Image (cartoon, rainbow, N blue to C red):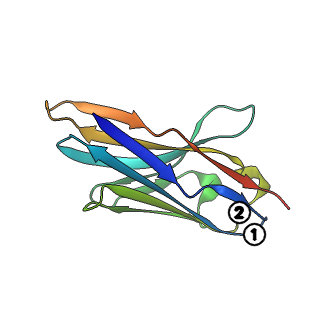
Amino acid sequence: QVQVVESGGGLVQPGGSLTLSCAASGSFFRINAMGWYRQPPGNQRELVSTVTRGGGTMYNDSVKGRFTISIDNAKNTVYLQMNSLEPEDTAVYYCQVDLVSICGGNRIYWGQGTQVTVSS
């Protein structure tokens, strides 16, 4: 069993900052990559940012220069530092974990989601 638990969402004013955290735990061989997706109200889920075990990162153009993703391999935890938040960043943020299972196959796991609301 693998558990993926997010934390750090909340209400913030425009221009403010939040840091999201996501920790994976349970039985698995190795994490390949972790990432964040978001689903704004009435819209489809979209990729925000990903980071590989080796530290390679990618960002959605809409968050480049404002968001920073990082990974702590020892803690199986990914962080998303979000600065200069805009109302358009309001969404449920989901953590995705790409890992190698105990059996050797690749698996994708999702967290339950954490709400981020940017409003004055």
Q: Residue at x 28, y 55 (%)?
A: 53
Q: Is 110 left, or right, of 103 in this rendering?
A: right
Q: Disc number at residue 41?
A: none
In the depicted view, which residue is nearer to us: 55 or 104? 104
In the depicted view, which residue is nearer to us: 35 or 5? 5
Residue 34 percent coordinates (x, y): 38, 49
Q: Is 90 left, or right, of 92 in this rendering?
A: right
Residue found at the far left of this picture: 103
Name the N-terminal-most of marks 2 and 1: 1
Q: Which three-letter amino acid code belongs to the residue tagged 2?
A: Leu
Dividing the picture into quadrants, the one containing residue 92 is: top right
Q: Which three-letter amino acid code belongs to the residue tagged 1?
A: Gly
Looking at the rendered structure, the secondary structure element under dot 2 is loop
Q: Residue at x 61, y 55 (%)?
A: 9
Residue 64 percent coordinates (x, y): 59, 61
Q: Residue at x 24, y 62 (%)?
A: 74
Quadrant containing the N terminus in the rendered view: top left
Asked if residue 82 is positioned above or below residue 34 in the image, the reply reads: below
Neighbour class for label 1 at 10 Å: few (<14), some, many (≥20)? some
Q: Is 52 left, or right, of 44 in this rendering?
A: left
Neighbour class for label 2 at 10 Å: few (<14), some, many (≥20)? many
Q: Disc number at residue 15?
A: 1
Q: What is the distance, in whole Å, between disc 2 and disc 1 at their CAs?
A: 5 Å
In the depicted view, which residue is nearer to us: 84 or 16? 16
Asked if residue 69 is positioned above or below residue 95 in the image, the reply reads: below
Looking at the rendered structure, the secondary structure element under dot 1 is loop
Q: Residue at x 27, y 46 (%)?
A: 32
Residue 114 percent coordinates (x, y): 59, 46
Residue 97 percent coordinates (x, y): 37, 42
Task: Identify residue for label 2.
Answer: 85
Mark 2–mark 1 contact, CB under 8 Å?
yes
